Image (tube, rainbow, N blue to C red):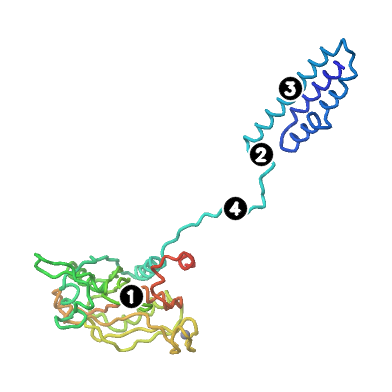
Amino acid sequence: MLDKIESIKSEALNASSGISDGDSLEQFRIKFLGRKGTIHELFEGFKDVKPDEKGKVGKALNELKVLLQKIYDDKKSEYEKTGGADDEADITLPGRTFNKGTRHLIHQAIAEITGIFSKIGFDIYEGPEIEDEFHNFDALNTPEYHPSRDMQDTFYVDSKGKDKRYLLRTHTSPGQVHVMENSKPPIRVIVPGKVYRNEEVSARSLAVFHQIEGLYVDKGVNFRELKGTLDHYAWEFFGKGLKTRLRPSFFPFTEPSAEMDVECILCKGDGCRVCKHTGWLEILGCGMVDPNVFQSVGYDPDEYTGFAFGIGIERTLMVKYGIPDIRIFYENDIRFLKQF
Ligand SMILES: [Zn+2]
């Protein structure tokens, strides 16, 4: 009996070194410590041991039981500490995704449009968002009585103690005045930025939105160059070879003035919901710089001519992607933003 206990002891020690995962640990338990295991068998056989050996055998048997239980407990806690990684990892589970941020659609568009114009020689200028009345209105041939100067349409800034009235710029056009005041022709510049109007927020209008203003001044700049430059922009931004057209319009700071349409990119001119069945999409306002604007910055209108244009970013994106509601740009709904 003592020999048997000894051989089981060495067998168990051997087996314990082979325990590498939950399965082999459980097999060890069943084989040695289970209800029909080796230890149980040995205790069953104890009643047949001769009385004079019972003391010795009993002691050895108890020591063996304690040893095997300790081996099992140690291995078990070691296995639990490692989390049973080998055994339990479910490689069929989907991985964890990390949502990557992207540039906002508005900023992507500003980068793309300024890129188109800088490739053909336009510089980028960013003017202040708080302007005085001279730069926002007077210098741009918008007289005192013009309705856009009304408190109802413009956010005026508290100008107490100042020599001028200040306001949040209502367009990016004052940027061209700053550039002309501070440099001599030839000038080719675009002015991207935020503009502010006291408008009721609706599906079509916001109180804050983005524009890109463009200005080209030199000797002998003509309307044909305006059309060529804007056709280039329309083809780069909306699609090569699309038809464009200019419609007569009015802006105080250009004469003549026009609005540019591009053939509807969705229906290619056949008429659809997005182009309101006209086949055309309005993309910008433009014109030849009014001589009064040149005079207010000290340029001689007999010497210089130029053209200017203004692109509404939100409006342009609504046209390009068929977005029905301008407010969606600022709702920060990730389902909308991550499409771009
Ligand atoms: Zn259409």
Mark 2 vs mark 3: which is more N-terminal? 3
Distance of label 1 from label 4 (alpha carbons)? 42 Å
> Is mark 2 in CB contact (under 8 Å) with mark 4?
no
Tag 2 secondary structure: loop
Query: Looking at the image, how many numbered discs can be counted on the residues?
Result: 4
Residue identified by numbered label 1: 201
Amino acid at the residue labelled 2: Gly
Q: Quadrant of residue 146?
A: bottom left
Please rate how many residues cluster around mark 2, counting C-alpha atoms within 10 Å: few if below 14, some from 14 to 19, many from 20. Answer: some
x%, y% of residue 137?
Answer: 18, 76
For marks 2 and 4, the one nearer the N-term is 2
Q: How far separated are the C-alphas under marks 1 and 3? A: 80 Å
**C-alpha gap between disc 2 and disc 3:** 25 Å
Q: Which residue in the structure is indicated by mark 3?
A: 66
Q: Residue at x 62, y 34 (%)?
A: 81
Q: Secondary structure at mark 4?
A: loop
For marks 2 and 1, the one nearer the N-term is 2
- Mark 3 to mark 4 CA distance (whole Å): 44 Å
Q: Say whether mark 2 is within 8 Å of ligand 1.
A: no
What is the spatial separation of the Cα atoms under label 2 and label 4, in whole angstroms? 19 Å
| Dot in front, 1 or 4 | 1
Instruction: Identify the residue under disc 4.
Output: 95
Give the CA distance from mark 2 to mark 1.
Answer: 59 Å
